[in-house]
Amino acid sequence: MRFMVLMIPGDKQVEAGVLPDEKTIAAMMKYNEELAKAGVLLALDGLHPSSKGARIRFSGGKRTVTDGPFAEAREVIGGYWLWQVKSKEEAIEWASRCPALDGDVLELRQVYEMSDFGPEVEHQEAALAAEVGKRIEENKQRPAP
Amino acid sequence: MAAGPTHRAIEAVWKIESARLIAALARMVRDVGLAEELAQDALVAALEQWPESGVPDNPGAWLMATAKHRAIDLLRRGKLLERKHEELGYEVAAQLELAAPDLIAAIDDPVGDDLLRLVFISCHPVLSTEARIALTLRLLGGLTTEEIARAFLVPEATVAQRIVRAKRTLAAARVPFEVPRGDELAARLSSVLEVVYLVFNEGYSATAGDDWMRPALCEEALRLGRILAELAPREPEVHGLVALMEIQASRTRARIGLAGKPILLPDQDRARWDHLLIRRGLAALERAEKLGGGFGPYALQAAIAACHARARTPAETDWPRIAALYDALAQLAPSPVVELNRAVAISMAFGPAAGLALVEALASEPLLKDYHLLPGVRGDLLAKLGRFDEARAELERAAALARNARERELLLDRAAACARGLAPA
């Protein structure tokens, strides 16, 4: 199973665009290396402060664009990892080993995969896939696939 | 293992720590079987103590210290000597004492080498293929005997037997706990890669409705492959194998249709391919290429898979390049199956008649006598040439040879399509 691991920094300096000190960066790099060595790490990215981002709100059929920073938001995501693990407990164990700073929060969210939808949706999906396959075949108008 | 939050947490720690724990212990006691027993003892102790005391801050170090105490205890009571380790007993004792002060460092650092040694010993050629697979999943994947049995659809006792015998064989052959060097390395590495790819294929060939453990084998093989790529980053074929597995796994969602019917590559909805895995696969292939020395068999297969992965539609597929890659593969690792695939690639690049000529040449190949894909491919090529009668007969023959029920169905569908081709609506 896959987990998206969201890093919510506790230090507001991060939102101000201040990069962490060398020691913190080195510890995080070592941690990422450990994740890679264990075959767990699929992807990771750090995010710029929310001042460089924007929010698009949908309400009453209208879209409202607000530029960052998101002053009202208490929790702004600073980066994320994507992990492949065997269980939620394994993800928690890896997250617990993160050299996070005081006040940081890691949020684990399981990524939806086909098998999570149960057999019914899987069949619908499969039916759709079969339909697409059939169309392709019809379009080609050939007797053998 | 019993369910319950702490037990599940312990299982997770085991999944993360067991391989390096066993690897470090094996270096100390020079016996993989004993190392695993010691690690298991530590696990049992954790299961007894952690639900009360909570999971320690550094669970890996806790397990290591516990296993080592157990080893010293056995040694003091002369149990290790009884285990026919007379000649090693004293040396082992010295090793264990030496290891004591920098225990944490021992777990943290030269782990890579220990793990690599464990990989090579688990995939040692003195062992049968089945034994290598079982031992690798058990020692490196941290899978239980029950999980391995479910994945391979064999009784648990069979797997347990295989593992016990494998450990005995390794001990009897006095296989040293080391990474092979020089000429031996290439052969031993290919044995390791073979095991990982066999595990992958066992999961990949399983279809929907099967036990969930079978698809989980793909994930396990990918994990082993990714670990191996970190342990042996200068081996191009390791990256080649990882690339091949990542790209193949990227199609998992798209390759199974209604009621588990396989969907062939040209008919797959490419939007459903996993583009993260494709990106990872292409990156691994690039690493293999940058190491130089030309592509090995896995990298070549990965390069072929990459041609498909890069094509947004089947029509965009670079068939001449695929045909050239199959030419290279046929020279490096000649086999009738590769030859058959080469024939398909050539038919796609240069027309069905060119492919058919190659397939006809394989007709007398004894290794393909019962291989359903030979008449399967021949049938498809005949159909493309408008020879529907012959095509139908070939596809029906292929269906009769197919062992997988869903593949059989698919072949019969194609045979029926040929019948329709004969009688235009």
Image (cartoon, coloured by chain):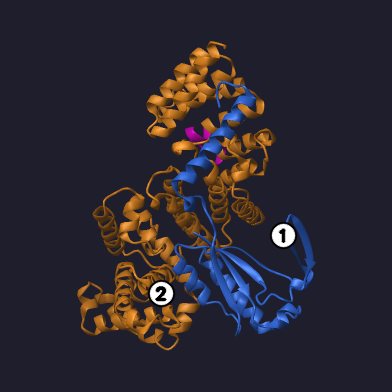
Total numbered badges shown on the rendered structure: 2
Give the class, few, some or many, for how many residues have Cα within 10 Å of label 2's Cα (few <14, many ≥20).
many
Colour of chain B in the image: orange
The residue shown at (63%, 44%) is B271
Place of residue B76 in the rendered image (x, y in percent of width and height, measured from the top left): 24, 85
Where in the figure is residue B14, as x and y percent of width and height?
A: 39, 70
**Residue B177, numbered label:** none
Residue located at (41% from left, 65% from top):
B118
Per the image, the residue denoted by label 1 is: A59
Question: Main structural element of the magenta stretch: helix, strand or loop?
Answer: helix
Identify the image quadrant of residue B75: bottom left
Element under disc 1: strand
Residue type marked 1: Ser
B172 displayed left or right of B252: left
Pointer 2 indicates a residue of which chain?
Answer: B
Q: What percent of the width, then of the height, locates residue A74?
A: 66, 77
Q: Does residue B240 appear in the picture of this structure?
A: yes
Q: Which quarter of the figure is the C terminus of chain B placed in?
A: top right
Chain letter for the part of the structure drawn in blue: A
Q: Give the range drawn in magenta.
A: B331-339
SS under mark 2? helix
Mark closer to the observer (2, 1)? 1
Q: Which of B341 and B423 is in front in this view?
A: B423
Q: Where is residue B3 in the image (x, y as percent from the top left)?
A: 33, 67
Residue to which mark 2 is pinned: B24
